[in-house]
Amino acid sequence: MNINTQLIQQSKIDTVDFNNLNFGRVFTDHMLVCDFKDGAWQTPSIMPYAPISFEPSARVFHYGQAVFEGMKAFKDDNDDVFLFRPDENFKRLNKSGERLAMPPVPENVFIDGLKQLLKIDNDWIKKGFGNSLYIRPFIIATEGAIAASPAEEYKFIIICSPAQSYYAGDVRVIMAEKYSRAADGGVGYAKAAGNYAAQFYPTSLAHKEGYQQIIWTDASTHEYLEEAGTMNIFFRVGDKLITAPNNDRILDGITRKSIIQLAEDNNIDVEVRRVSVAEIKEAANNGELKEIFGSGTAAVINPIKGFKHNSDAFELPVLKNSYASLFKEKLLNIQYNKSNDNHGWRVKI
Ligand code: COI
């Protein structure tokens, strides 16, 4: 496809300490930008990563018309670069956009544009388990108007950030009793910017108590566990893996669905069903609760060390052969081209 390309004069890559990356703070030399105006997506451009300007009245600032994705690129020992299930991100971005009345981004702009961007910024993708390039595609409403209605102008942008781990240190969670992330009929399933901002305040209260995240419960009863702020959630009770089903409150996580598939491939019993706070507390009390872990592109698979609900706090056992480490290893082996890719998830750039 036709992409206007303007390359930087001098790369900033030598100023970056790739062994000490703070997640999401450093960006590669280039970004992709594509404008929607006059009812159509225009020719995309790859240009130097730099501030962009638009009207202070742009609807994104006032009405939150913004959706995004999270993806990663991986480099193998032969310097080949791979994406993981990019078609899923493409579909989900447009599903989120549809919910916020945004025009769908064409597949070639997303996929071909991203591949081209990764070829240009290839040196920013470092080899080795744990190193990756985090990719953030997003759409924002840029048309200036104080009018609470869908914009007629948008920007689709892809920026990239070299990444190591998202969470440094242990993660403990609080199960939500008062605040909610999403409600039936709302935008919980969409990767809408506001879904995240709405969690900041309750999560900051959790931080004050020494917890890093909240596991959100259903908004109407607060009895069923749904997802955490940046991750979907899995519970291992005995040898069984349990996770909440997708619905219009829960993000259809790509890492989540990959784990469910990997569990089935490895003959691990998976139950995709409502999971109650009461049953998890009971399983913790009787020693049946072996693990809780979160999954997401940024976080990969993150063990939860402990949780709190009401005034009851629990610590989880440290397992030698945890499901979290099994799935993480299997996932990383596929992502870094170290094992067979039986489901066709790896896409070479
Ligand atoms: C991701 O896991 O890629 C996400 O988009 C979550 C984000 C809050 C870092």
Image: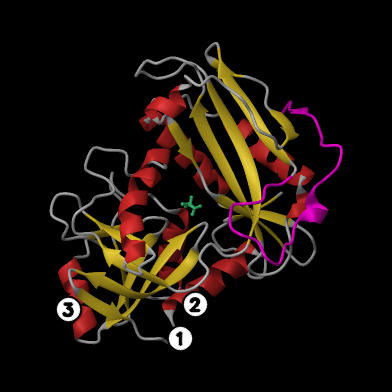
Residue at 63 percent across and 19 percent down: it is 42
Query: How many C-alpha atoms fall within 10 Å of the one at disc 2: few (<14), some, or many (≥20)?
Result: some
User: In the figure, 162 relative to 164: above or below?
Assistant: above
Query: How many C-alpha atoms fall within 10 Å of the one at disc 3: few (<14), some, or many (≥20)?
Result: few
Which residues lie in the magenta part?
1-28
Q: Quadrant of residue 77?
A: bottom right
Residue at 52 percent across and 40 percent down: it is 90
Q: Amino acid at mark 1?
A: Asn
Label disc, if present, on residue 321 of the rendered structure: 1
The answer to whether the residues at label 2 and label 1 have Cβ atoms under 8 Å apart is: yes
Using residue 289 as the reference point, say whether residue 160 is left or right of it.
right
> Is the CB of mark 2 within 8 Å of ligand 1?
no
**Rendered location of residue 93, percent (x, y):** 48, 38
- SS class, disc 1: loop
Q: N-terminal of the two: label 3 or label 2?
A: 3
The label nearer to you, 3 versus 2, is: 3
Q: Which residue is mark 2?
A: 325
Residue at 52 percent across and 18 percent down: it is 153
From this viewpoint, is residue 340 visible?
A: no
**Rendered location of residue 44, percent (x, y):** 67, 26
Q: Amino acid at mark 3?
A: Glu
